[in-house]
Image (cartoon, helix red, strand yellow):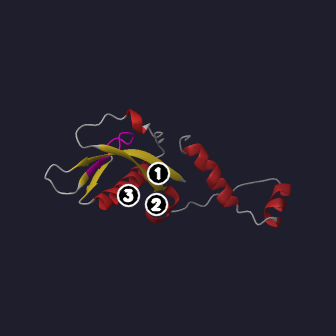
Amino acid sequence: MKLAYPAVFTPYEDGTEGYAVEFPDLPGCVTGGDTMAEAILMAQDAAGGWVLTELEEGKDIPPAGVPDTIHLTGGQFVSLVAVDMDSYAAKYGKGAVKKTLTIPAWMNTFVEKNGISCSKVLQDALGKMVLPKR
């Protein structure tokens, strides 16, 4: 699942090219980097970690706000930061949990004939229920 949250980038006050990054929609999710590229990568990692923690704790994650409604002060700017939660969870998540499911025999026949992965279908469907509508 791909997510995108607006992030506020604030230039470091010491005159270096670094940025502090904060996500208005993800309380307490802040990071930074000594360069723009590093700040963006750190922002992706921070947002991915924040969302993964919420999901693993069974909490809802907030929908992304509208970038145009964020109040900015001197030198700040907003940029959307994208996070691939499938990749992030595979790398940092607590792993998979085996579940047993029951489906009608006719459906199983269809699944087997068409090479459909029930696990993938279930993950995709549950992902749409767990993550906020975009």
Residue 94 visible to an observer of this rendering: no
Left or right: 97 as drawn, with respect to 42? right
Residue beneath label 1, please? 56
- Please tell me which residue lies in front, 42 or 55: 42
Spot occupied by residue 61 in the image (x, y as percentages of width and height)? 46, 42
Spot occupied by residue 73 in the image (x, y as percentages of width and height)? 25, 37
Nearest to N terminus: mark 2 or mark 3: 3
Label 3 sits on a secondary structure element that is: helix
Q: Report the predominant secondary structure element of the magenta stretch.
A: loop
Q: Is residue 43 above or below residue 27?
A: below
Q: Which mark is residue 88?
A: 2
| Magenta-drawn stretch contains 23 | yes
Residue beneath label 3, please? 45
Give the quarter of the figure containing the C terminus.
top right
Mark 3: give few (<14), some (14-19) or many (20+) Cα within 10 Å.
some
Q: Is residue 40 above or below residue 63?
A: below
Q: Identity of the amino acid at label 3?
A: Asp
Please tell me whether mark 1 or mark 2 is closer to you in this view.
2
Nearest to N terminus: mark 1 or mark 2: 1
Left or right: 126 as drawn, with respect to 7? right
Spot occupied by residue 96 in the image (x, y as percentages of width and height)? 55, 62
| Residue interval drawn in magenta | 20-28
Label 2 sits on a secondary structure element that is: helix
Q: Which mark is residue 76?
A: none
